[in-house]
Image: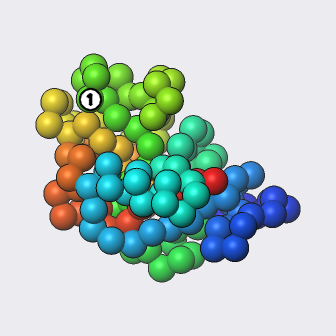
């Protein structure tokens, strides 16, 4: 179910799950996606709950993003493998992993989403990440 709230967002941003989101296209590394979000006045989206993941996944689908293409969101386990942290340093408790994820050990330290599920991937995107999900 795609949940719209009566939140008012700036032009170019869409209200989803009580926040404002914007999808940027382009095959970039996570750090570039983070900088691109900052350039448009936001940050990498921080998906904190399974309900938010469902809403964001539906939002991406409704905007024509195919289920086999990924998007960057906030999250890394570069400091300690298996301990996922947001950019602010808060520990993330992800319950919506894709099947067999996370599986990257020390080589896949960034967080992406596809088809309403999270996965770990190299921070360069390995040619799979085609979008960046920003939040304001």
Q: Residue at x 54, y 44 (%)?
A: 47
- The answer to whether residue 39 is left or right of residue 13 is left
Check the image and name the residue furthest to the top: 80
Q: Is residue 131 above or below residue 82?
A: below
Residue 39 visible? The answer is yes
Residue 58 visible? The answer is no
Seen from the viewer's position, the closer of residues 40 and 126 is 40
Q: Residue at x 81, y 63 (%)?
A: 8
Residue 119 location, x and y as percent?
33, 46
Q: Which residue is mark 1?
A: 78
Seen from the viewer's position, the closer of residues 35 and 25 is 35
Q: Identify the secondary structure beneath mark 1.
A: loop
- The answer to whether residue 3 is left or right of residue 93 is right
Looking at the rendered structure, the number of numbered marks drawn on it comes to 1
Check the image and name the residue furthest to the front: 39
Q: Quadrant of the N terminus?
A: bottom right
Residue 35 location, x and y as percent?
40, 54
Q: Residue at x 50, y 67 (%)?
A: 23
- The answer to whether residue 130 is left or right of residue 115 is left
Residue 112 location, x and y as percent?
36, 50
Report crowding for label 1: few under 14, some 14 to 19, many 20 or more residues within 10 A (C-alpha). some
By what rule are the colours in the image chosen? rainbow
- The answer to whether residue 114 is left or right of residue 39 is left
Q: Is residue 40 above or below residue 109?
A: below
Seen from the viewer's position, the closer of residues 120 and 136 is 136
Q: Residue at x 49, y 60 (%)?
A: 39
Residue 4: image quadrant is bottom right
């Amino acid at each position: 179910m795609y949940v719209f709230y009566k939140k008012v967002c700036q032009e170019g941003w869409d209200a989803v799950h009580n926040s404002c989101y914007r999808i940027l296209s382009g095959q970039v590394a996570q750090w570039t996606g983070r900088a691109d979000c900052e350039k448009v006045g936001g940050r990498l989206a921080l998906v904190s709950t399974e309900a938010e993941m469902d809403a964001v996944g539906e939002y991406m689908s409704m905007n024509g993003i195919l289920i086999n293409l990924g998007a960057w969101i906030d999250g890394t386990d570069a400091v300690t493998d298996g301990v996922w942290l947001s950019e602010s340093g808060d520990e993330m408790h992800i319950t919506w992993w894709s099947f067999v994820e996370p599986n990257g050990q020390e080589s896949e330290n960034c967080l992406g989403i596809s088809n309403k599920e999270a996965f770990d991937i190299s921070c360069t995107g390995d040619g799979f990440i085609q979008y960046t999900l920003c939040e304001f």
